[in-house]
Image (cartoon, rainbow, N blue to C red):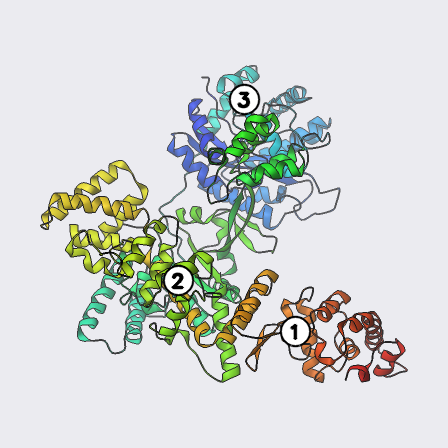
């Protein structure tokens, strides 16, 4: 193979334009004997870190770049038909400084210059040129376009500008040959220009897919991007099948007469010396009072929290708590995570002070006593036997995940606080990527191939539902799909092309909960962009940010917390009782009896039919049964359901693999449900420390044969040393290896069971208030509202229709009944609701339809909204019939609009408000009063 490096390559992250997947692309570069490879996606750097890792793993030097769009005037100009199109420029990071400049340019293109596409301009390029190598670009490059338009003076001037800002040794004239019309003639001009200006030449192939055979699939991707049919003569197309990762020999056959353009690819690859630093940590400064370090302040907060959480412990419990807290603090401090815990404590403390509901915890963090003492979590890890080492231990050096549930209505207030605390430039939301799943790929490709909706829909519906169902799996699992492909060439083509685009990123969006917080401005660390809602978003995903040592948090919005808050508020309003769900007993028989009957509508986690049936069979009577139920109802653990339930009801003898582990497995009737049980068994039977036991758990998950063999020997020899015979030790290892694949994190299950219990307790003791809150939480879904209304009727709770004189936006409790909320009425916007409430609060009850129209601002209330109120029965309490109201509505609304308009213009009607109503010929006050 002749020496050559591809320096202009579009991966799958040139969304719906590139078809080359990063992993196979790196493998192909290695197979072609190329020492290096560049990534230059259009205007973004989404795939930079994944590309770096993929290339490094196969021994190919990764070069990080971007093909930027250059504005024709400035990045701030946005005149239609003048600034619509941009030039292309290929930039490569040659040094750490160059990488920082590249991400600065990429970010500025999105944050400052976005107009159809992210754009930079000459001004900002000049300010951020250091450490970058620039290639003049493809046919859409600025130099190339001027030459193509027979403007050699402009071409020379532009090339000289780039030479001067990047340096003559760092700006190259790019030549390409994909067989496009005029390309070779253009290349001759580019070669001449380069030699006149003393610039280097470089050959590239503008790769958009990996192999020539992928050209058709790439063509389909372009059609998906532009919503065009492949048969549309005016659609975007590349015109040839030459935009693939060619071998060095192929590139030399094209550009052998310009050998320096090929040799320079090796020169540039050698110049590019940038590596990501994955070991650094960019932790923001924690809020610590003067005179304290992170460690001493954390220690103080934890000691105070321990006294608050356990006000009067027995001497034995006090000793256990002190020892556990000391151990956890030592690990946290040794790993350098004290600041991390303080940062999380700070914004959760803000939420508590502001009365923003916070969940009891999510995931393995609930196993931490430190987190419990700080108020980060609200479930006792000692009482519920949760293990700290499942969350954090000396063998795991990366930041542990502390994901927090907030009330979904107030989550944004916590994010705003974090932005104020650490700085707008140091906090951002996080990108995530939607990919083409199997059914979506079939539908997208079918549209591109000009197939009818009916044809495509029929094939798509043959793909089985379920997570991770690929088209290859679908063809194995669905005989009808395989038969359709075998019988029809068009279906076969559809599926072949769908398989080639399946899994490609389709769009970038904002992660529902992810937030990143840095110790320095993010624009200098990662590329940024702006969401449609104008939020600043990282171009890197959560996993990538974690690899780069940035603190990423999940600020999750949990609807159930809003339900609990709303129910507690309604109880206080209607009964004068103050309820704190954190103080309720966990052994209330009424709760377990209700759940055992399957009365689960509105109960967190348990209202699906499958879980409802599980509770009927299980008949729980202790909190631990609910914890187990949350963990069991998953594809793997469901295989153990019968054993668990039979053990629970004494229909089978509970057996333990060894007497020493009976205490661990007793609460789950001998069935190993939790990952923590795997760890505890390893500790009790084989003498593993909890850190070693967590490594064992991870080994079971990864299923590496070599690692498993080592762990088996360590486990068995440890058990034998503790007096267990080898056969029993082997059998137990086999048993836990089988269960470990199914095991669920108890530290995740327990807090979810707690939220489930809290909602069940509210429903059991305050059913009207709870159902009103549940209805309020689903007001934007007519199906869910109908479901809960039916549940109320089944429970004997009367749901009254909406009423213009009684209803508020939310569902409310009125004398033991639920009044329908205005926000659940179709076509009624928030502005109209606020207008209705304001008019009613100011002038008292409405007396008639016209009185309503007259007093509510008609700029907020349109005819469609008013019709919806009439049809929903909101005027029934005023007398008359809905048909009469509908007949009168146009005239009453028109008269009211006229009157309000006159008043806004400062004029007085010659007739009073009542006369205006009469003048319109509409039912007036005396008709319905």
Which of 385/619 is in front? 619
Separation of marks 3 and 2 at Cα, in angstroms:
75 Å
Residue that numbered label 3 is attached to? 261
CA–CA distance between discs 3 and 1?
A: 76 Å
Residue at left offset 71%, top offset 43%: 83
Question: On the rendered image, what quadrant is the N terminus found in?
Answer: top left
Residue picked out by circle 2 = 616
Q: Are marks 3 and 2 in contact (CB under 8 Å)?
A: no
Residue topped by disc 1: 802
> Can the viewer see residue 336 in this picture?
no
Relative to 802, is 499 on the left or the right? left
Of callouts 3 and 1, the N-terminal one: 3
Query: How far from the left and from the top, in percent, is residue 111?
Result: 59, 50
**Residue 633 spot, x, y in % from top left:** 39, 54
Cα–Cα span, label 1 and label 2: 36 Å
Side of 638 relative to 523 (left or right): left
């Amino acid at each position: 193979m002749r020496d050559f490096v591809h320096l202009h390559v579009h991966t799958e992250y040139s969304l719906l334009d590139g078809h080359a997947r990063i992993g196979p692309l790196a493998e192909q570069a290695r197979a072609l004997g190329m020492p290096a490879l560049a990534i230059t996606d259009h205007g973004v750097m989404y795939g930079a870190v994944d590309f770096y890792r993929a290339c490094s793993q196969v021994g190919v030097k990764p070069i990080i770049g971007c093909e930027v769009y250059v504005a024709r005037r400035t990045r701030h100009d946005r005149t239609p038909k003048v600034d619509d199109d941009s030039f292309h420029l290929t930039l490569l990071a040659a040094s750490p400084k160059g990488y920082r400049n590249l991400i600065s340019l990429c970010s500025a293109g999105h944050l400052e210059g976005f107009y159809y596409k992210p754009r930079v301009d000459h001004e900002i390029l000049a300010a951020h040129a250091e450490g970058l190598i620039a290639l003049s670009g493809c046919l859409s490059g600025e130099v190339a376009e001027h030459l193509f338009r027979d403007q050699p003076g402009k071409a020379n001037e532009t090339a000289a500008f780039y030479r001067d800002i990047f340096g003559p040794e760092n700006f190259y004239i790019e030549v390409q040959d994909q067989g496009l019309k005029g390309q070779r003639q253009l290349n001759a001009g580019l070669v001449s220009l380069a030699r006149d200006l003393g610039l280097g030449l470089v050959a590239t192939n503008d790769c958009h897919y990996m192999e020539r055979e992928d050209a058709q699939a790439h063509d389909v991707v372009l059609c998906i991007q532009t919503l065009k049919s492949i048969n549309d003569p005016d659609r975007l197309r590349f015109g040839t099948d030459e935009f693939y990762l060619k071998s060095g020999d192929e590139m030399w056959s094209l550009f052998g007469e310009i050998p320096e353009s090929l040799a320079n690819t090796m020169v540039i690859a050698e110049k590019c010396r940038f590596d990501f630093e994955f070991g650094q940590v960019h932790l923001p400064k924690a809020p610590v009072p003067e005179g304290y370090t992170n460690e001493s302040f954390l220690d103080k907060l934890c000691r105070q929290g321990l006294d608050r959480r356990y006000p009067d412990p027995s001497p034995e419990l006090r000793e256990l708590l002190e020892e556990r807290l000391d151990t956890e603090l030592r690990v946290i401090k040794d790993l350098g995570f004290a600041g991390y815990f303080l940062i999380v404590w700070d914004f959760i403390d803000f939420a508590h002070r502001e009365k923003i509901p916070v969940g009891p915890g999510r995931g393995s963090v609930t196993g931490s006593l430190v987190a419990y003492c700080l108020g980060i979590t609200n479930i006792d890890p000692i009482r519920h036997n949760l293990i700290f080492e499942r969350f954090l231990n000396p063998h795991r050096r990366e930041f542990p995940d502390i994901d927090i549930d907030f009330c979904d209505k107030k989550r944004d207030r916590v994010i705003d606080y974090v932005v104020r605390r650490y700085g707008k430039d140091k906090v951002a939301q996080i990108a995530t990527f939607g990919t083409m799943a199997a059914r979506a790929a079939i539908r997208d490709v079918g549209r591109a191939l000009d197939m009818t909706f009916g044809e495509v829909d029929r094939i798509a519906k043959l793909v089985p539902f379920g997570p991770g169902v690929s088209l290859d799996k679908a063809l194995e699992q669905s005989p009808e799909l395989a038969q359709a492909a075998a019988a029809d060439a068009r279906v076969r083509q559809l599926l072949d092309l769908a398989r080639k685009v399946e899994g490609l990123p389709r769009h970038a969006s904002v992660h529902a909960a992810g937030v990143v917080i840095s110790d320095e401005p993010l624009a200098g660390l990662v590329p940024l962009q702006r969401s449609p809602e104008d939020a600043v978003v990282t171009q890197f995903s959560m996993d990538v940010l974690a690899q780069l040592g940035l603190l990423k948090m999940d600020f999750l919005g949990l609807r159930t917390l809003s339900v609990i808050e709303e129910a507690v508020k309604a109880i206080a309003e209607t009964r004068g009782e103050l309820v704190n769900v954190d103080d309720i007993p966990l052994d209330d028989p009424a709760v377990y009896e209700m759940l055992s009957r399957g009365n689960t509508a509105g109960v967190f986690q348990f209202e699906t039919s499958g879980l409802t049936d599980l509770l009927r069979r299980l008949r729980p009577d202790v909190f631990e049964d609910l914890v187990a139920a949350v963990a069991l109802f998953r594809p793997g653990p469901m295989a153990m359901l019968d054993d668990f339930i039979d053990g629970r009801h004494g229909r089978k003898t509970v057996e333990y693999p060894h007497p020493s582990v009976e205490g661990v497995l007793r609460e789950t009737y001998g069935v190993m449900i939790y990952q923590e049980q795997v760890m505890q068994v390893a500790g009790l039977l084989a003498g593993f420390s909890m850190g070693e036991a967590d490594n064992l758990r991870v080994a079971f998950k990864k299923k590496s044969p070599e690692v498993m063999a080592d762990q088996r020997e360590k486990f068995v020899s440890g058990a034998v040393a503790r007096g267990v015979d080898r056969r029993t030790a082997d059998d137990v290892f086999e048993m836990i290896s089988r269960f470990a694949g199914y095991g669920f994190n108890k530290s995740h299950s327990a807090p979810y069971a707690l939220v489930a219990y809290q909602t069940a307790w509210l429903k059991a003791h305050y059913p009207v208030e709870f159902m009103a809150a549940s209805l309020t939480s689903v007001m934007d879904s007519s199906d869910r509202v109908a479901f809960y209304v039916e549940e109320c009727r089944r429970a004997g709770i009367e749901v009254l229709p909406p009423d213009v004189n009684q209803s508020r936006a939310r569902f409310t409790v009125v004398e033991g009944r639920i009044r329908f909320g205005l926000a659940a009425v179709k076509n009624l916007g928030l502005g109209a609701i606020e207008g209705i409430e304001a008019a009613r609060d100011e002038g008292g009850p409405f007396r008639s339809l016209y009185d309503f129209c007259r007093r509510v601002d008609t700029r907020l209330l349109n005819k469609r909204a008013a019709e919806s109120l009439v049809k929903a029965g909101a005027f029934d309490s005023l007398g008359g019939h809905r048909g009469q109201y509908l007949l009168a509505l146009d005239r009453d609304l028109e008269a009211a609009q006229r009157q309000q308009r006159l008043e806004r213009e400062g004029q007085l009607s010659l007739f009073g408000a009542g006369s205006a109503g009469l003048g319109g010929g509409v039912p007036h006050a005396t008709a319905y009063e």
